[in-house]
Amino acid sequence: MDAVIELLVNKVATFVDENVKLIYGIKDQVDELLEVLKSFNAYLKEASKNSRVDENAVLGDVVEKIQGVVDDAQDAIDQYVIDRRNHLAQGITRYMKKVPYLKKVNDSAKQIDRIKQRALTIRQEHFATMEKLQNGISHVTNVVIHHQPVVEEEDVVGFDGEAQTIKDRLNEDSNDLAFISIVGMAGLGKTTLTKKVFSDSEIQYKFFTRLWVYVSQNIDRKQIFLNILSNFTKEIDCFKCIADDQLADRIKTYLEGGKYLIVMDDVWEMSHFKLLKIAFPNNRKGSRVLVTTREQEVAKHADSIGKPHKLKFLSDDESWELLQKKVFRKELCPPNLETYGRSIAKKCNGLPLAVVVIAGVLNVDSTPRDWIKVDNDPFPVINQKNQDYNELVKLSYNKLDFHKKKCFLYLAVFPIGHEICAWKLIRLWIAEGFIPPVEVEATAEAYLKDIVNRNLLMVSKKRADGEIKTCRLHDTMHMFCKLEAMNKKLF
């Protein structure tokens, strides 16, 4: 993360050097700001080498704040240079406008000084927080959704065939331990499908021991191991001082005796998967581990045969069926609302959670006007701040580094539903300056693949060599990008 700040600060410094004559009136303020940012970057570089997990959360937060400071500084200096050029272009008449121009210079100097003070405040607050962490006064972590919003079991739609596919893999005639991955974008129903299989009477009968492990982004391996042990014994206090690897060995002894099914829900990193899988022994009894993830690379490497199950989108009819169930429960939809309802369901483009979120603002008492309003523009409802879907997408978005975030948000410039040509997109990213100046084309291609692998962007067509030819942004993602880009004033 320190590299991001260094790149940005160097970009500003280079711009200042190239326009040194034009920034003469505010050069002192700009130099002071650059000194503050450079010293802060040097500190972040050193701190990131030795930080703990809780300190990493704080460092990530402060990096994002400093990115905002540097962006604002760049904008302020750019604007000053533009004003200066316009002033000089006026020739001799500029001397008649000297007083208002000097006021502009003074205002710009004050603006740069305010930006510098923001940086100093961020640094002061950061130092205070880190000191508390190191002294054990407080514990800071990122906000994590511990219970992913899911569709209630009685409202599950469109998963019968998928559930059978997963059950067939669970029932394969092999005594070796097997890992089965389920992968898909946020809100597609990975957890819902897995719960459907996990609760199936046939699966319950075949797997005497069944355990659900929620992993999440901020993995706490010791706590997960303790939670697993609590299923076998109430005496877990004596385990709290034992090392993680020893806890894994204890879990193995409990699992060795019978056929077990473990669900590892919401795995974000391959390293997290490896940290946990050591507790699951190959007891040669046909045991199975189900892994859900939105990361394609994690799914591919975690799956025993390298063929993860890719969750499908709902059909238009299935989306409408789900919307009816969520809004009307056991009642029938009034005929005068069905046209609007089907239209709304279709616009959710097969994403179950989008349907559920929409259903949350409609009910049996909603008027035709309410349905028409949602039908005209359903995406602000789906992507509204602090809404389930918005928060789920943010979890994936926040995993991107600074440059990839800009590349992803840039996708909002394309029309909704547009099929995007990959090579054109890459060249647009490069032209916009979103790609670090090192092997730009290869880096841009890697960025595109990473965004696809995180299920933030869908591949529409592939070339003969298997590379991405065209891609498409899901409509709900398009709205997320648009809102986030506006908030960050990206374009």
Image: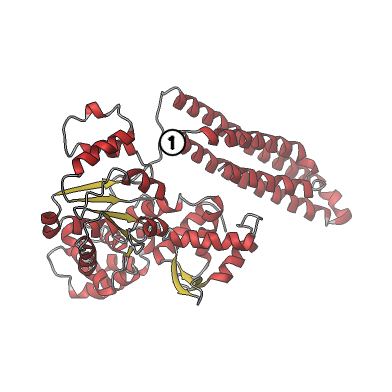
Bin the neighbour count of mark 1 within 10 Å (Cα to Cα): few under 14, some 14-19, many 20 and up. Answer: some
**Could you tell me how many numbered marks the image carries?**
1
Q: Quadrant of the N terminus?
A: top right
Q: Residue at x 66, y 40 (%)?
A: 111
Image quarter of residue 172: bottom left
Q: Quadrant of the C terminus?
A: bottom right
Q: Is residue 68 left or right of residue 382?
A: right
Residue 103 lies, in percent from the top left, at 74, 42
Q: Is residue 87 left or right of residue 57?
A: right
Coloring applied to the structure: secondary structure
Residue type (three-letter) at the residue carrying disc 1: Val
Residue 267 lies, in percent from the top left, at 35, 50
Does residue 269 show up?
no
Residue tagged by mark 1?
A: 53
Q: Is residue 332 left or right of residue 464?
A: left
- Residue lying at the far bottom of the rendered structure: 464
Q: Residue at x 53, y 65 (%)?
A: 413
Of residue 303 and residue 106, the one placed in the foreground of this image is 303
Does residue 233 show up?
yes
Of residue 211 and residue 21, the one placed in the foreground of this image is 211
Residue 359 lies, in percent from the top left, at 26, 61
Q: Is residue 378 left or right of residue 177?
A: right
SS category of the residue bearing label 1 = helix
Q: Residue at x 65, y 55 (%)?
A: 438
Residue 212 lies, in percent from the top left, at 23, 48
- Residue lying at the far right of the rendered structure: 92
